[in-house]
Amino acid sequence: MREPDAAFTDPRQAVLYDVFDDDRSDLDAYVAIAREVGARRIIDLGCGTGSLAVRLAGEGLSVVGVDPAGASVQVARTKPYADRVTWITGDATALGGVAGEADMVVMTGNVAQVFVSDEDWSATLTVVRAALRPGGRLVFETRRPEVRAWEGWDLAPTTVSLPDGRAAVVTRTVTVVDLPLVTFEGSTAIDDEILTSTSTLRFRDRDEIERDLLAHGFAVEDVRDAPDRPGKELVVLARVSLEKGL
């Protein structure tokens, strides 16, 4: 599959992720859903620096955190409750060892949108379905393309104080809008060092998402508004179909 962005694979940038995105109240919804459906065995696919995985593990749940960016996984391993998580460095195809065991697979943040090709998205849904027990759930968020959120993504040079007392100057620029793909570049300047990363996300509308899920053996159970981005983002709950032949 496509290699992850430098923001996650470069150790110098991976350690800054939680500094720049320190409000993770968006994860409250996923903790609540895990309780709602009674999930005890959870896979956090695209776990990044592990903020959700360790939080779920702290609640006594069995958690597998999976991410292809080794630098991000290394950050995750340093957090409280990290020793209770099974960490896997790899993409979804690395989940063969947990086939048919998970109650829930979750993808937060931009994870569902990093699969820009139909092939990568299909392969991911296929592996996720195989990893879930009968009746298990896939839960993920995705931005609504009609909102055109990328029009507000440009960030002028902004100074951010780092924990070690240094200052970082952060910028972000949307470079290509060729729907359904949007590409943007980020830059972080610290002292004399400039760290850069380029990201591309795919925006799928609700109809496309539901068709793809159905084709891969899922039944859409619910589509909710994201509490942290009301009107801008969907949270999809899909269940492994129990119909014969699926």
Image (cartoon, rainbow, N blue to C red):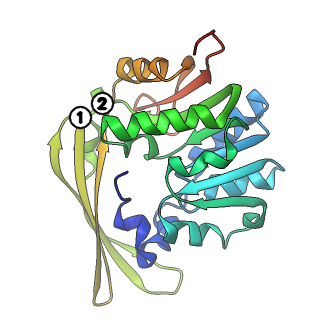
Identity of the residue drawn at 41% across and 23% down: 212
User: Residue 237 appears at what percent x and percent y?
Assistant: 58, 26
Relative to residue 236, is residue 122 drawn left or right? left
For discs 2 and 1, the disc positioned in front in the rendered view:
1
Residue 29 can be seen in this image: no
- Whether label 2 touches label 1, CB < 8 Å: yes
Q: Quadrant of residue 147?
A: top left
Q: Which residue is disc 2 drawn over?
A: 145
Most foreground residue, 29 or 62: 62
Q: Residue furthest top?
A: 244
Residue 106 visible from this viewpoint: yes
Q: Which amino acid, mark 2?
A: Pro
Q: Residue at x 53, y 80 (%)?
A: 163
Circle number at residue 7: none
Residue 88 position in % (x across, y down): 61, 59
**Residue 205 sits in quarter:** top left
Residue displayed at 72% across by 36% down: 34
Q: Identify which residue, 62 or 35, lies in the foreground.
A: 62
Amino acid type indicated by mark 1? Pro
The residue labelled by disc 1 is 180
